[in-house]
Amino acid sequence: MKLILSDPPFAGAPVVVLIAGLGGNGSYWLAQMAALQNRFQVVSYDQSGTGNNPATLPDGYSMADMAAELLSALQEAGINRFCVIGHALGALVGLQLAQDYPRSISALVLVNGWLQLSDHTRRCFHVRERLLQSGGAQAWIEAQPLFLYPADWLEEHAPRVEAEEALALAHFQGEHNLRRRLNALKRADFSATAAQIRCPALIICSRDDLLVPWTCSQTLHDALPHSEIRLMERGGHACNVTDSDAFNTLLLSGLETLLPIAEKELL
């Protein structure tokens, strides 16, 4: 698996690994890159079966597979301990890593994530899968902004959204891979194991998220023993994109607290 690694800003700089959601592309985090790179070594990547990591995903592909393949790639790059910043599906990969490889995870930042899929989110994905079945990749991609962004932001950024749609269609991961990654997302359930995760965690969510109710993040916070939660009043599911300034402020202040605690816990 190909990774994109920034140069460490100083010797021994903490490593943060950015994990996107169902789209899988590392470019999702562009609004966070500049804010992070002068304090951390930043790792981003396109998930297996997407972008510059093409693959045909097998039946039964799971969160455990996603976590294992990422850890293997990081270890090959000489990175053995890191903080995960994950959005939605990426947050689930972070939870899986913390569960399966606790010595490798210094901290977690979980953005609009969950313990197990809510009935509301399951309904949203059911609708989107019906669109995929009837209208193919174009229908899936055209519907996606409605679940990611607030309506007023969509109205104000219509040319950008159209350009994003064209790019997403040109680099669509394929229905086969999308369905297997979506099935892995729907099966993931950390409700019985979250209490065993010992690393510190920051949970960030948006109150107006259409796809994942913010209360899912509250439930996640209640389940993780060493977590804090920050609620953005607006921003939608992709709040790190639509209000990147507010999000980055929360992210950086949280990392300043999380990583020293994590290193102390390791000793």
Image (spheres, rainbow, N blue to C red):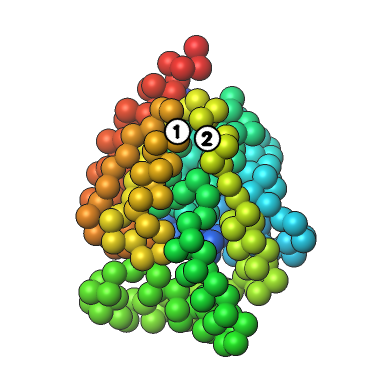
Residue at 32%, 30% in the rendered image: 256
Disc 1: which residue: 224
Residue 251 position by quadrant: top left
In this view, which residue lies farthest toward the right? Answer: 58
Q: Which mark is residue 194?
A: 2
Residue 100 position by quadrant: top right
Q: Note whether 58 is above or below 134 in the view shown.
A: above
In this view, which residue lies farthest toward the top? Answer: 267
Q: Note whether 227 is above or below 240 in the view shown.
A: above
Q: Is residue 231 visible?
A: yes
Q: Is residue 73 visible?
A: no
Amino acid at pointer 2: Ala
Label 2–label 1 contact, CB within 8 A: yes
| Badge 1 density bin: few <14, some 14–19, many ≥20, Cα 10 Å | many
Amino acid at pointer 1: Leu
In whole angstroms, how far apart are the C-alphas of marks 2 and 1?
6 Å
